[in-house]
Structure formats: structure tokens, C-alpha cells
Image: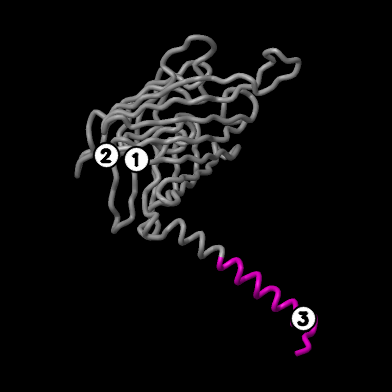
Amino acid sequence: MWRTPYMEKRMHIKKLRKGCLLRAGILATLLCGPGFATEAKAQFNLGMTGRLMAPTAEMNETGTFMIGGNFMPEKGNPFGYHTGNYFVDFTLFSFLELAYRETLLKTTYMTSKPKFNQQDRSFSLKVRVLKEGKYRPALSIGAHDPYKNLGNNYYRGIYGVATKHLDLKGNVLMLTVGYLGWTGDRNVLQDGVFGSVSFSPVWCRNLSVMAEYDTHQVNLGLSAKLWKHLSLNAFTEGFDCIAGGVRYECTLWH
């Protein structure tokens, strides 16, 4: 059958639409299929349970191990250039979480031009003092980068935080409020109150839409969990820049 150029163009557009719908369907299946309905929960920039920049009182189940890395844009870190970190996190008990991270530093150590040849080492811990109940929130206390050997405490801070989950006909709304103190002059966060809201729809529980106030700015972001183990996230820091990361998690024991 002979086709005019207009007919060829229409067929090409239909093929493109089918391809887009197929890819969208595959992505929706990965995100929202029954085998993947696990809520992602993480303080993404520091590699712990929490939200975007601010912590929460929630904990992973005992024996959960996480490993991953994050892109940290220039405006969202204290170093003055784009960088990143990588981390490991372990929930040793149902009430205790430990994390260790390395942040890439650009220095002139043994070189004439700045290069990524140094790393800032820091760790965090969180202790849950009260488990969430039907009417009461979970309560946790924690610390980031509490001591130093050499260099600066870029992430230093101590916090107390309360978190409550609300079931809205299968949709999950999580509310968090807390206070961060002892931050020092190098931390991108400041002493003060922080809070966050996240929403996970019933049709895609492993997808979370988040908004938070991290003591000095508002952040918005998304997180998604794939195959029960891989989590992806992207968010704006104060609407000035975009950060993101990836992590792998598994449960070593129950």
C-alpha cells in the first residue's frame, strides 16, 4: 500500500506513543507492583533513616544494612563545590541505628591544583526511646559527627525528634517535628526546629512525596524503592539546587 508523507508521519507518531506508553507501564510496574510495595525511609543526604535533610524518629527493622552514595551540590554543602558522599548504615537493634560516611574533599594536598584526594570521615547514631503507638508518636534522639580527630565537624549536631504515621484509607501520611542543636559554624544546618511531611499513596506505597523544613530552608523531593532493595531519591534544597542519591538495603537477620 502506497503511503503519503503525512501517513508516514502519523504512523511514526503512533509508534512513538506506543513506545512511551510501554516504558511508562514498565516503570509503573516496577514502582507499584505487588512485589515492590515497600515504603522507602531514609535521611538521604547522611545515609540514615529520615527524610531529605532532616531526621525522623522511625527505625528500620533489626538487622537492616544499607549502603549507598549521594550527590551533594555546591549550594547544599559547606565545601563550596559539587561533591558527594558514600555511606554504610546498620540497624543493630530495634532501637539503635549506626551510620558511617565518607565525604569527598577537593584539596591541594600533594598537588598544585585542587583535586578530590581527601575525605571527611564522620558517623551518626540514633536511639529510639519510645516506640510509636496507636495514639502516641515515636520518639528518638541522635547525634551526627559528635567528635573530631583532625579537621572540622561538618555535620555536627544533636537532635530530638517525634514521628507519627497516619493511615488515611490505605494512604500513609507521616508527620515529624524535632529540634536540632550544637551544630557548629561549619554545618549547613542551623540550631532550630525542623519538621517534615511525607505521603505514600495506597496504589504505590514505595513511592513517597516529601516536604520538609530543615531548620533554615524548605526542601521538596521524591523517593522510590525498587525490587525491595534499591532506593532512588531526588530533591531540591531550598529551591536553589537539586540533590539525589541511590542506596541498596537488605535485612541480614530479623
Answer with the quarter of the image where residue 164 lies: top left
Mark in front: 2 vs 3 = 2
Closer to the N terminus: mark 3 or mark 1? 3
Mark closer to the chain start, 2 or 3: 3
Residue count near mark 2 (Cα–Cα under 10 Å), binned few <14, some 14–19, many ≥20? few
Under mark 1, the amino acid is Thr
Q: Amino acid at mark 3?
A: Tyr
Q: Position of residue 74 (x, y in %)?
A: 62, 30
Foreground of the two, 151 or 78: 151
Q: Which mark is residue 6?
A: 3
- What kind of element bears circle 3? helix
Q: Are marks 2 and 1 in contact (CB under 8 Å)?
A: yes
What's the magenta region?
1-22
Q: Please say whether residue 13 is one of the residues in the magenta stretch.
A: yes
Residue 70, picture quadrant: top right
Query: Residue at (80%, 80%) from the top-left corner?
Result: 5
Q: Height in image: 204 above or below 69? A: below
Q: Position of residue 188 (x, y in %)?
A: 52, 25
Image quadrant occupied by the N terminus? bottom right
Whole-number angstrom distance, CA of label 2 to CA of label 3: 62 Å
Disc 2 marks a residue whose amino acid type is His
Most common SS among magenta residues: helix
Residue 203 percent location from the top left of the image: 38, 60
Q: Position of residue 183 (x, y in %)?
A: 45, 19
Give the labeled residue for mark 2.
Answer: 254
Real-space Cα separation, disc 2 to disc 1, in angstroms: 7 Å
Q: Would you identify the image quadrant in which residue 250 lies?
A: top left
> Which of the two residues, 240 or 120, is positioned nearer the viewer here?
120
Which numbered dot is residue 251? 1
